[in-house]
Image (cartoon, rainbow, N blue to C red):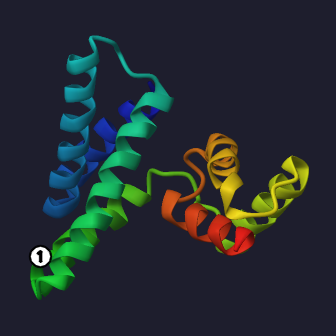
Amino acid sequence: MELKKKLQQDVATAMREGASEKRDTLRMLLAAVKQSEIDNKIVLDDAGVLDVLQKQAKQRRESIHDYQQAGRAEMAATEESELVIIEAYLPQMMSREQVKAVAEQLVAELGVTDSKGMGQVMGRLMGQLKGRADGRLVNEVVRELLT
């Protein structure tokens, strides 16, 4: 529960510093963690808290995209600032080149040569890269390799 405690400590620190945006974002994250705990009737460990944070980050990325398409720059900017705070608690994501190297190795290992084996490759690859790479990026890389 170290990650959850870190979030709680950082809320207190943000309150002392008067960083209202960071405080509000961290409170929102803690509320999402608590809601997940209540829904699943469990106490989340670090892996569970990390899953919640990743879902929140994904939600922000999608909102940013939607707001930009709708021409709502101020709303997109708010979501982007929240995303920056959330990403500070997430592990470093893999680059496109790193994902491609792992994907190439897996494709060679499985002997897949065309797009018919994409599901097999994606299933194994997402299992290996869970939490370390964005699913869209992995999908793009695998499509490039198999077409």
Residue under the point 35% across and 15% down: 43
Q: How many marks?
A: 1
Describe residue 108's horizontal placement relative to residue 21 as left or right.
right
Q: Secondary structure at mark 1?
A: helix
Residue shown at the point (35%, 56%) measured from the top left: 57
Left or right of 73 in this view: 33: right
Q: Residues within 10 Å of mark 1 (few under 14, many from 20)?
A: some
Residue 31 visible, this orientation: yes
Is 44 or 117 nearer to us in this picture?
117
Q: Position of residue 76 (x, y in %)?
A: 19, 77
Figure quadrant of residue 147: bottom right
Amino acid found under the numbered disc labelled 1:
Met
Is the residue 56 above or below the residue 71 in the image?
above
Q: Where is residue 85 drawn, in percent x and y?
A: 33, 61
Q: Is residue 38 above or below residue 91?
A: above
Q: Residue at x 32, y 46 (%)?
A: 10
Q: Quadrant of residue 44?
A: top left
**With respect to residue 76, does 125 lie above or below?**
above
Residue 140 horizontal side relative to residue 36, left or right:
right
Q: Position of residue 108 (x, y in %)?
A: 89, 57
Q: Compared with residue 101, is residue 12 higher up or lower down, i.e. above or below?
A: above
Q: Residue at x 23, y 53 (%)?
A: 14
Query: On the picture, is 70 further left or further right than 95?
Result: left
Viewer-proximal residue among 142 and 50: 142
Can residue 95 be seen from the camera position used here?
no
Q: Quadrant of the N terminus?
A: top left
**Circle 1 residue:** 75
Place of residue 54 in the rendered image (x, y in percent of width and height, measured from the top left): 40, 48
